[in-house]
Amino acid sequence: MYEVSKDERVAIRVDVLERVCLDELTLLYTVRKNTWQRLAYRCGSALHTQRLTRDCLDAAQVANAFLAHRVFSEARALPWSLCYGDMDKNLQELLDDEEDPSDPTAWKIRRLLEMDDDQGFHFQAFSRIPHPAFQIPAPLLIASPGRKWQVR
């Protein structure tokens, strides 16, 4: 949570956040037995050391798996993957891909890139977005120099 509070843009920081989660999980596995014993004692005599250890490690693994499956994998998929790394390269790869993206937002971004012969115009417009954790409203209004607004 501390890392997310510093900068909530998961799509840009996915590697850092994933590493922090794995480090914290590893840290739990390195906690010594006497520490677990003290924690179990403080939690009450009904809670045994082995059970506390097992429950904490199980909960940490479930939370880590959830983050990996539902958060980090989403951040690596379109359209969020466009924000990670070299944005110009990512947009060019999206444009060069033979198949249309299945994600509707990525599809709209690709259409925007295809609308004008001067690709640099669009890349420059995307690179000016200061905060990549943005939402593109649907339907997306697309404009190109010399053309009217179109709804896609």
Image (cartoon, rainbow, N blue to C red):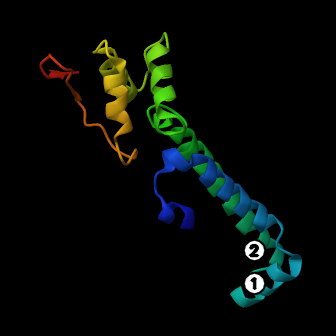
Would you identify the image quadrant in which residue 50 lies? Answer: bottom right
Question: Position of 57 compared to 109: left or right?
Answer: right
Q: Which mark is residue 52?
A: 2
Q: Residue furthest left?
A: 148
Comparing 146 with 40, the one in front is: 146
Q: Percent from the top left, x then y, of residue 9?
A: 46, 51
Comparing 83 with 138, the one in front is: 83
Name which residue lies at 71% across and 68% down. Answer: 56
Q: Percent from the top left, x then y, of residue 29?
A: 81, 65
**Whole-Å distance between the Cαs marked 2 and 1?**
8 Å
Q: Percent from the top left, x then y, of residue 8?
A: 46, 57
Question: Position of 23 compared to 120: left or right?
Answer: right
Across the whole image, how many numbered discs are drawn on residues? 2
Would you identify the image quadrant in which residue 41 lies? Answer: bottom right
Q: Residue furthest right?
A: 33
Q: Which residue is label 1 attached to?
A: 39
Q: Percent from the top left, x then y, of residue 113?
A: 34, 20
Name which residue lies at 66% across and 57% down. Answer: 21
Q: Residues within 10 Å of mark 2 (few under 14, many from 20)?
A: some
Q: Residues within 10 Å of mark 1 (few under 14, many from 20)?
A: some
Element at label 1: helix
